[in-house]
Amino acid sequence: MWRYKEMMPVEYEENIITLGEGWTPLFKAKRLGELLGFSNLYLKDESLNPTGSFKARGMSAAISQAKEKGVKKIAIPTAGNAGGAAAAYAAKAGQEAYVFMPDDTPDAFQIECEQYGAIVEKIDGLISDCGKIVAKRKEAEGWFDISTLKEPYRVEGKKTMGYELAEQLNWQLPDVIIYPTGGGTGIIGMWKAFQEMEELGWIDSKRPKMISVQAEGCAPIVRAFNEGLDNAPPFEGADTVASGLRVPSAIGDFLILQSIRDSNGYALAVSDDALLEGVTPLGKAEGIFAAPEAGATVAALENLLENGQIQKDEQIVLFITGSGIKYMDVFNSFS
Ligand SMILES: Cc1ncc(COP(=O)(O)O)c(C=O)c1O
C-alpha cells in the first residue's frame, strides 16, 4: 500500500511500519457470479492482508505516524480485527499496545493480540463502552488513542483501497461498491481517495454507487439513511454475530451518509442468518473463507437486485473485508 506513499501522511520513509499490507487481489468472481446470476461480479480480497483484514491498512498508517510523532504506548477499543492489527503493528514499531474488546469477542482475537505482546482487557459491554474506558484512562496512562477517526491517520491507510481499485481497473471505477459497515472508515477512506484522484487528474468525476451493508441487529446507518437524517442516532440493544458491524454509534456517521447519498447509493441491513449463509458461496465458488461481515455483502445482493438498486450486468465489487479463520466460535454456534 505504500506505493501510494506520496499521498500518505508519513514524512520520513524510515518511520514506515509495514508487514506487507495492501495490493490485495481484485478479480472477477466468475463462479460466484454464475451461481448468483451476475455477469460482472468482482471481489476485492482483503482477507489476504497481514492479520487477516483490511484493518491492517489503517494500522500501518496510524502506527507509522505514531512512531514519527514519538508515541510509545497506544490504546484501542475494538470489535476484534482492528485490535489484532493494532497489536501487530505496535509490536513491529516497538510500542506498547493496550486493547479493549467486548467480552463476547471471538477468542482468537484476544489470543492473537496477546501473542503480539499486547495487554488485553475484555469488557462487559459494547465497543462504545470500550471506547469510553480508553478516553477516561488515556491521559493518566500516557496512551495515544487510536480509536476510529479519533486520530486522522487510519483513514489515510484505508483510502488506499480506493487507489488500488482504480489502478487495478485501469483507472475506471466500477459501477457499484458493496461494503460492510461498522465505524465506516472503509467507505469514508475510499470516498476520500476518489476525490483526491480526481484532483490529481487520475480519474474523472464518475463515482461508484456506494452501498453500505449492516446487520439487522445493529443498523444505525441504514435507519438514518431511510429516515433522511444527516447523523445516525445510537442504535439501542446492538446485537449481531458479525462483531465488526456491532458499532451502535459511528463517530463518522455524517461522512458515511454523505458518501452514500452523494454517490446515489443505498444502505440496507441483512439478518445474522443471511450474512453467515453469505459466507458459504464465497468458500464453495471462489475458495475464500470470509468473515461474517464480508458474508453480508453476498447476502445483500438478492435484495438489491429485487429493489432495482443494482443490475445483473453492472460491474459490482464486493469487499471481502476479512478472513473467517478467527470466527470459529461464531461458525460453531451456528452450524
Ligand atoms: C471483517 C470486518 N469487516 C468490516 C468491518 C467494518 O469496518 P468499518 O468499522 O470500517 O466500517 C470490520 C470492523 O471491525 C471488520 O472487522
Image: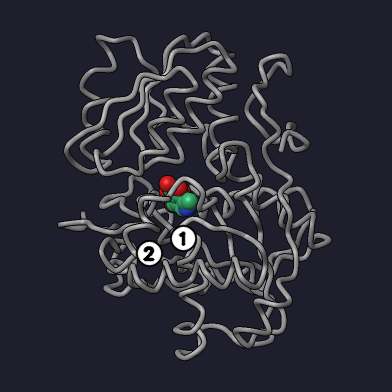
Quarter of image, res 14 = top right
Q: Which mark is residue 67?
A: none
* Figure quadrant of the C terminus: bottom left
**Can see residue 149?**
no
Quote the CA–CA distance across marks 1 and 2: 6 Å
Secondary structure type for disc 2: strand
Image spot of residue 9 (x, y percent): 62, 28
Residue at screen point 64% across, 22% down: 17
Q: Is residue 153 placed above or below 293 in the rendered structure? A: above
Q: Nearer the viewer, residue 203 or 238?
A: 238
Q: Would you call the spot at circle 2 few (<14 residues within 10 Å), some (14-19), or many (20 or more)?
A: many
Q: Nearer the viewer, residue 259 or 147?
A: 147
Secondary structure type for disc 1: strand
Q: Cβ–Cβ below 8 Å for labels 1 and 2?
A: yes
Quarter of image, res 151 = top left
Q: Nearer the viewer, residue 14 or 206?
A: 14
Image spot of residue 68 (x, y percent): 59, 14
* Figure quadrant of the N terminus: top right
| Side of 170 where 299 appears, left or right | left
The amino acid on which the numbered mark 2 sits, given as a three-letter code, is Gln
Q: Earlier in the sequence, mark 1 or mark 2?
A: 1
For label 1, the residue is: 180
Q: Is mark 1 within 8 Å of ligand 1?
A: yes
Residue at screen point 58% across, 60% down: 319
Residue at screen point 65% across, 46% down: 48
Residue at screen point 52% across, 87% down: 305
Q: Which mark is residue 214?
A: 2
The amino acid on which the numbered mark 1 sits, given as a three-letter code, is Pro
Q: Would you call the spot at circle 1 few (<14 residues within 10 Å), some (14-19), or many (20 or more)?
A: many
Q: Is residue 335 placed above or below 303 in the rendered structure? A: above
